[in-house]
Image: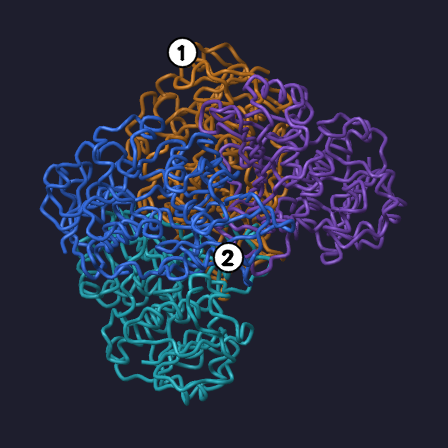
Chain colours: A purple, B blue, C orange, D cyan
Amino acid sequence: MRASVVGASGFTGGELCRLIDTHPEFELAQATSREYANKTVGHAHPNLRHLDVRFSEPSDLESVDVLFAATPHGVSMEHIDGFRDAADLVVDLSADFRLPSVEPYDEYYDGHARPELLDEAEYALPELNRENLPGADLVAAGGCNATASIMGLLPLFENGILDGDERVVVDVKVGSSEGGAGGGRAASHAERSGVVRPYAPTGHRHEAEIAEYLGIDVAFTVHAVDMIRGASATCHVFPDGPVSKGDLWGAYRGSYEDEPFVRMASGGGGVYRYPEPKAVAGSNVAEVGFELDRSNRRVVVFSAIDNMMKGSAGQAVHAANIALGIEETAGLEFTGLHPVGAP
Amino acid sequence: MRASVVGASGFTGGELCRLIDTHPEFELAQATSREYANKTVGHAHPNLRHLDVRFSEPSDLESVDVLFAATPHGVSMEHIDGFRDAADLVVDLSADFRLPSVEPYDEYYDGHARPELLDEAEYALPELNRENLPGADLVAAGGCNATASIMGLLPLFENGILDGDERVVVDVKVGSSEGGAGGGRAASHAERSGVVRPYAPTGHRHEAEIAEYLGIDVAFTVHAVDMIRGASATCHVFPDGPVSKGDLWGAYRGSYEDEPFVRMASGGGGVYRYPEPKAVAGSNVAEVGFELDRSNRRVVVFSAIDNMMKGSAGQAVHAANIALGIEETAGLEFTGLHPVGAP
Amino acid sequence: MRASVVGASGFTGGELCRLIDTHPEFELAQATSREYANKTVGHAHPNLRHLDVRFSEPSDLESVDVLFAATPHGVSMEHIDGFRDAADLVVDLSADFRLPSVEPYDEYYDGHARPELLDEAEYALPELNRENLPGADLVAAGGCNATASIMGLLPLFENGILDGDERVVVDVKVGSSEGGAGGGRAASHAERSGVVRPYAPTGHRHEAEIAEYLGIDVAFTVHAVDMIRGASATCHVFPDGPVSKGDLWGAYRGSYEDEPFVRMASGGGGVYRYPEPKAVAGSNVAEVGFELDRSNRRVVVFSAIDNMMKGSAGQAVHAANIALGIEETAGLEFTGLHPVGAP
Amino acid sequence: MRASVVGASGFTGGELCRLIDTHPEFELAQATSREYANKTVGHAHPNLRHLDVRFSEPSDLESVDVLFAATPHGVSMEHIDGFRDAADLVVDLSADFRLPSVEPYDEYYDGHARPELLDEAEYALPELNRENLPGADLVAAGGCNATASIMGLLPLFENGILDGDERVVVDVKVGSSEGGAGGGRAASHAERSGVVRPYAPTGHRHEAEIAEYLGIDVAFTVHAVDMIRGASATCHVFPDGPVSKGDLWGAYRGSYEDEPFVRMASGGGGVYRYPEPKAVAGSNVAEVGFELDRSNRRVVVFSAIDNMMKGSAGQAVHAANIALGIEETAGLEFTGLHPVGAP
């Protein structure tokens, strides 16, 4: 199948090019970049220096089977008709179609230009929405921080341990790739290395996504820490009544036992007892684990993903595989490295 | 004044040697290390290679004005009589005398060998206990994670915004120096770099310290992140009723306005809008800041310290200065570097 | 084909398990570890937590098609008969069979227990020794620093720009994974992060390997820098007469044009103009590039590899593929990530 | 004495503000920044948040005793008359007055606007030029990579081991602060972390400085590695005849024994056997050490500095102290931290 990437010079766009290039069913038909048009893909992405593909202008879209849009928020809603004309399946990685109703766009973003399409779009996260993906023609990948949080909390909701009126605090730690390839002053190595930098301490946009898909208002704070790839969500959960470890294992096994991209890491032995972003760097795996305090009243859930894989490009390819009837795990078999930096 | 350091080859011991060496009133009379006895201090601490001081055996304590004990937990309670014989003032940096009653030692540690001394010991944190330090002869420095948390939360208690029955979640991020100089597989660079590693997700010992000194049971989780020095506490606080930014500023100004080692960083401009461990690396400064959500019901408090300074050696020297009637800030004037890594 | 890994709990052993697990022709028949016997492979290697394989005792070797030995120097020469009894092909990743004659073992190591086997062993590096690998039954992977250096310098020798009596200075920068999984004090995160640490400033063992295979005595110095995976060799070369950029391009193209695991990176555009370890992390690719000074008398060659892939486990699998008549690139298609840390 | 900093919002400018603020003889009279005029100094430099000083426009220079110019190359030569009108002593930290003759400006820079002043300017490095500093009114701080190299090589020239016609290869590793506060894509954390990035593999500007002050053409290559502060020079030196360790110790002791800011680190015990940038981070100390190979024909010299201190701001204050007749070490007593990141 022919696949194209719009916005291919950014970090997520490069990740899509990489995944498509080694995908058994896809070939990279086109990679667009206004800034780097006519330069090789390797100019922007050194890991793809061997690829004989050049960026083309985004105005010249070729006809393909699947188009991945990795553009900044707001671009896809403007160009969505052109994208859909060019491709049978459009997978958008921005926030533009990721929420099911227009209200949160008004509250957290600058409104929405094409609200009538929100109903058509399917949320890409298979663990949450697998049944609606086959045959979909517009799919929207989730936000990376929301994905990490949802992957951690989902089994508690699916299995009745939470129902939406409890107190949940989500404290997220993310890497620098989340900020994109732009490189402003705050993103510079000298200023960004070694930080524990709070941003959007309250009112982060991904709150809306969690609220929509889990039905709960979480207290949500994100910190930048010193890694490049990775998002780690620590969810402090206070169920209404006591729970047992058995209840929790039952919930997580019930939801994730057959999921190809979930690894449980919940207090076992060795150096890596809990989910760890660097253990999944480069892979589409989400690691999930939990602990319970002595009183059985507080649950701490940990969830770790590669923000560029499970948190965007990998999730997008996973959903495309399902939408197109391809083997779910095709092109996503890489399981991560050890040892490795996140940086 | 003559000052000695027991356990001087460890990270905290080295920090004490450094501070004493450049302190206007102290001279480094003795630095003990069983492992490195007879080697130069610079053998263990390259920043002190120029010092003409050799480690001596801890069994041979010289008589000094002030003795700083930087030994592992359990050692001070065993040797405390010898320490007090050798020095007019003993400042202990372990957990051995940091809690006022024996119960938490039974619950979180292996009990206590000298419970009768707990009443005599003064908690070192001047912002909490300055009035009891002058003339004290046994002072116990707080734990670094507890110190970061208390520095963030104290004004809310002192000024009536919290009274102890609210929900408070404290999510701490710490650097690798907290683990000490021992090494070990989990501490190795290859395994430790780039991590967001939960440890003691529930039941961390420093909970007890916060409970004792603030009178509140916090939900407390600590994560190792990729920095060497630094502890950053994010406190998610839910007061019983709505509060305003004015209330919060009033509280923090009220508690900290005259404190020489507190810097407010609360949403101003520039790259560093909130407290940042790397901005205080090497200094005794605590940075504190906060944000309030739109509903005025959730407060997020940030607090950043250098775990080896405000979180141990710096706090110890600060308390010793007060106990001995020296200028409070003597030897602690360094304000941190920019740019700098934490690593 | 059935493949086993002896010494599978170390870093290189884990990398072999990972490569074998996803190799189209291999299955992981056995992974031995004395220390972790009966624990899952994921206990030591979190990226393999999903594998249902447990470490077994090294005394119980199963019969396999290919055995990879990832043990410390000295172990293979002691156990080589048992290894060869168990497998048709033995690929050794230690230094034990990597040098063709016994003299350098006497000079740089502690001598050799089985010198008669040195003639039988084939050096694994395909770019240097491809023609002798098919059908080999004892193959020895090169040292990582030597591999980085040889990959940079080889075309200059193969194409007559150097002949062995010139001055060549090789200044190598390596990551912490080279030190193995042991975790002593010098390897700890707090001591190892951010270093530019010279070790073996003169007399490094890999000198011998370069001397044997290129026929030149290089001035060789290795520095530890802050990355986990990666070795970067900067070779300062002073040919006897002037050379041109055209000569150099001719040499590098002549040697590497058809090599599947070499990428040239020689002063092009973008952020990554020259070879970069982090661009090849996790891949078997060697990046090579060069610059020439104004006087045309000094050539600076850069070479970057992942020390655990091209510098050991990847090179071993590559050589095994050739020895066994499998597609050369099988199981080694991963091309690296962008962006990514090395850490 | 009143001191001002022109270009105070950059990294070097901030370092000067920090040093002046705690200097026993200086007070910070003015800190200029066009970009941040009227904002507090802490806006740009979080370690100085407590300072009650605001940036002012550079057009409004106050009269001071000493003016430090930390502006980009080319600015000082344009504004030098204004600087000298405002201050009795001008210390320039750019390249503008650092070379004694105009030729290298023509070759390595864009020429020079005020060549007649090159004779008046004194090179700031006290170890090289102390005798000419007292009473100087125009002082030019050296380049950081040149300073690291000169500090390593100087004793070999001063003591007859090198005379200028030998082969010397200098391989420098530097941190990201050297690139300044501007940001940009290549400087971003995601692209810059974990690199071993060659830049200016040949023809680096600091070659000229070494040639001028040591009288030797070195083969000079600089690599960016993952640290923020620090420059480490490895000098591979091939004297004409054999030398002994005794010769080398004699040379280094001869040149540096009484230098307050040089620490020898030459193969002793402990974790830090050789010069290490992170051991001097924040300090004005240069660490220097060496090794000799078995043949006594090759010397490897290591030199480590903080590029922002000994390599610029610290060197500038050191030279100003001497020029103004103040105690040499005033304001420069900080000896570095342990452990610490460079990042």
Report whether A92 appears left or right of D129: right
Is label 1 in a helix, a strand or a loop? Answer: loop
* Residue type indicated by callout 2: Glu
Is label 2 in a helix, a strand or a loop? Answer: helix
How many numbered marks does the figure carry? 2
> Nearer the observer, disc 1 or disc 2?
2
Q: Residue at x 61, y 42 (%)?
A: A219
Between D198 and C135, the one nearer to me in the picture: D198
* Residue type indicated by callout 1: Ser
Position of residue A1 relative to residue A184, above or below, is: above
What residue occupies the far right of the structure in this picture?
A: A85
Q: Is residue C238 visible?
A: no
Q: Quadrant of the N terminus of chain D?
A: bottom left
Q: Position of residue A301 (x, y in %)?
A: 56, 30
Q: Is residue B328 visible?
A: yes
Q: Residue at x 53, y 43 (%)?
A: B236
**Image mark 1: chain:** C
The mark found on residue C59 in the picture is 1
Say yes or no: labels 1 and 2 on the same chain.
no
**Image mark 2: chain:** A
Q: Can you identify the residue that label 2 sits on?
A: A191
Q: Position of residue C150 (x, y in %)?
A: 47, 42
Q: CA distance from mark 1 to mark 2?
A: 52 Å
Between C15 and D42, the one nearer to me in the picture: D42
Position of residue D336 relative to residue D147, above or below, is: above
Between C193 and C173, the one nearer to me in the picture: C193
Between C335 and B37, the one nearer to me in the picture: B37
The mark found on residue C260 in the picture is none
